Amino acid sequence: MIAVGSFVQKLAIFGGGLLTMASCSVGTGSVHSDSLTRYVDPYIGTGGHGHVFVGANVPYGAVQLGPSNISTGWDWVSGYHISDSTILGFAHQHLSGTGIGDLGDIVFLPFTGDVRFDRGEQGKEESGAYSLFQRSSEKVRPGYYAVHLDRFDVDVELTATERVGFHKYIFPQGETAKVLINLDAGIGWEGEKVGHLVVENDTVVSGYRYSQGWAKKQKIFFTATFSQPIAGYRLADSTSVQGGDSITARRTYGEFSFTKEDQPKEVLVKVAVSPVSIANAKLNMKEELAGWDFDATEQAADLAWNKELQKVKIETKDSTARKIFYTALYHTMIAPSLFNDVNGDYMGSDFKPHHLDQGNNYTTFSLWDTYRAAHPLMSLIHRDRLPDMVNTMLRIYQEQGKLPVWHLVGNETDCMVGNPGIIVVADAYLKGVTGFDKDLAYEAMKESAMKDDRGLDSYKKYGYVPYDKEKVESVAKGLEFAIADWSLAQVAKLRGEEKDYAYFLNRSQAYKHYFDKDIQFLRGKDSNGKFRPGPFDPFHSAHLANDYTEGNAWQYTWLVPQDVNGFIGMFGGDKPFIQKLDSLFVVSGDLGEEASPDISGLIGQYAHGNEPSHHVIYMYNYAGEPWKAADRIRQTLATLYTDKTDGLSGNEDVGQMSAWYVLSSLGFYQVSPAGGPFVFGSPIFDKAIVDVGEGRNLEIIAKNNSAENKYIQSVRLDGKVYDKSYISYEDILKGGKLEFEMGSTPSATFGVSKETRPVSVQ
């Protein structure tokens, strides 16, 4: 058991003594100059369509404690948008960067006077339980959030441990302090819901919330302990107050009052959550936050974040790029989030409680997004976490019959297309990660690939997904299935499973069915092998109504990261391929009124705001013109990521958008879906030290680096000339020194010859 004090001391020694117990000034909105958290700006991505979480949490924690606005809709799926000045309370779970809303559970609101037990209407505070606030009163940094609620004249501070949210309220002098527990409010498009509250004694209130939303069966249990005795309370089903010490209702509220004092009154509240039971929530609180030291807890959260941010130390004169980088790195560690209790209990995908003998269980797997960069980044700086991630996915397979697609609090949402769980498991397998059952992993990948759901039945029968068998997103489905199949084929090859290797490698060539050589686009084909008739407009997009997922033909034509060389051959070689790729970044056309808002961050028709485009720029290296990749990478880094509130070009997508920035700013990116290598681009920092684990560091140096000197001239690895335009995962993992010589004009030799280019392994 680790109490708060010992937790702080433990964190203080990480990083070779870089931090001491006095390294943070808590409660004042400042941190010590050695802490990398001072470079994080959590407001980045709160505007536009970034949808990022704002509040207090620790890396990969189960609790995301932060404000929820009363507004609803697509730009409020995280509960918070920079355009809003309302707070209905502070919820203990939030998503970050998704395109669909959920969670927002267990809302606490400190208040004075009387409030109506309802969400309320914008501009009519008397209509519900919410308050306006001034942005100037907010203080936001990793692990800490503070705000002043204008309506009630209450100051709020929040911090958190992994499974416990810690609230600090300062009420005005001469007012009765009150706290509302709102189990009615949630985020997203909820159906049935049930809230339960029980007043256990004069300081402890416990309960649960069941809801149907994006996650069809969401259950969260909690226990709350107050620092002051409760003087009175009311339990209500919205407008109907009920007697007794407990309530179970569809719209559950609990109002708790504390004695009036002549001086401003401080009330602290600790709220522990559990996916399993109230008893486990209590155990989580006992283990993680037994005491009442808010400042020490806040400091521990800051230290926890600093420890993880120290995984990559950069040197640059560009303060804006530094801020964007560490904010991006921070955003990659909000999820996946813990989904088990301190005793190892968790709620399975079969909606039954299970127990872990070791390790942790996780949730919030936005895999269609994160397999592309967020998980490859994790394999570099958090390789030690990969066994838990893979084991979680294998448990999901055992409990629901297939690997996760988009998993949320024990629920398979089946959101998005393809089999991304296969890709993530294969990536860990091919990178030599240990700590999980390799035979079970192979079984899980094969079984998932051989299902008949979501278009797989047609895909297996025809070798692609015909549009007359799957009415929407047929091309996107087939291309994503093929990427997963290639990943599985490489695992089969490694294991010596020759028949499986041949079978899945053949399936991974599905992209060839969609290629129309006359117009050089991938497009829909029917079950008779004929392309979709009628006029073909590669610009047009219709959300959930055409052959692509959140995109058009210009964007989806390049979704072949598993066989770039074979794909180049379809165009007739390097030159015609490059000519077509060049066009992607300059053409313009009408997407149509039905286009998805996810098609954003456009450079020509390259859509950086949506994940299927994220590998495309690096394809230039495969065709021998890496300097063109450098041009577009620098353009993307400089124009589609900023330090403003709308500093993301699309949804953050649970860390993927930020992971692209982290990897690309360091100078490389994993194009191949599983196993590596990492393809060189254009590093923007003079120096970076990447902690790859087990005491090893990769030192990345960019000599003569500047905005003009963006082209790699030559590379050295551990002092030796290195002529490849990529680096293997194994070489990165060894650590050492990677040196780039930069220049203002493209090199005539670097990455040009076929021997120096990356090759798609088959």
Image: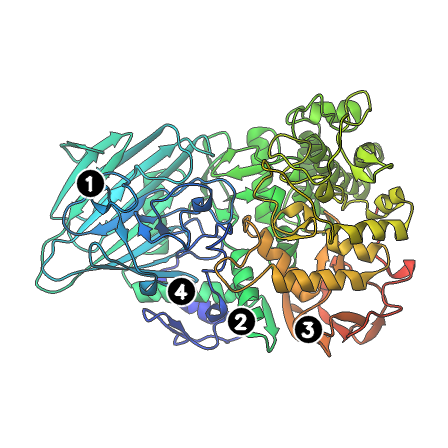
Identify the image quadrant of residue 157: bottom left
Amino acid tagged 2 = Gly
What crowding class fits label 2: few (fewer than 14 Cα within 10 Å), some (14-19), or many (20 or more)?
A: few
- Is label 4 in contact with label 2 (beta carbons under 8 Å)? no
**What label does residue 707 carry, if any?**
3
From mark 4 to mark 2, how far is it between C-alphas?
14 Å
Q: Where 571 sits versus 242, above or below?
A: below
Name which residue type carries label 4. Answer: Ala
* CA gap, disc 3 and disc 1: 56 Å
Going from the N terminus, do you reach mark 4 or mark 1 first?
1
- The numbered disc on residue 116 is 1
Mark 1 element type: loop
Identified at 35% across, 52% down, the residue is: 67
Specify the amino acid type for callout 3: Ala
Can you say which quadrant of the picture contains the N terminus? bottom left
Helix, strand or loop status at disc 4 = helix
Label located before the other in sequence (3 or 2): 2
The reply to whether callout 4 and callout 1 are in contact (CB within 8 Å) is no
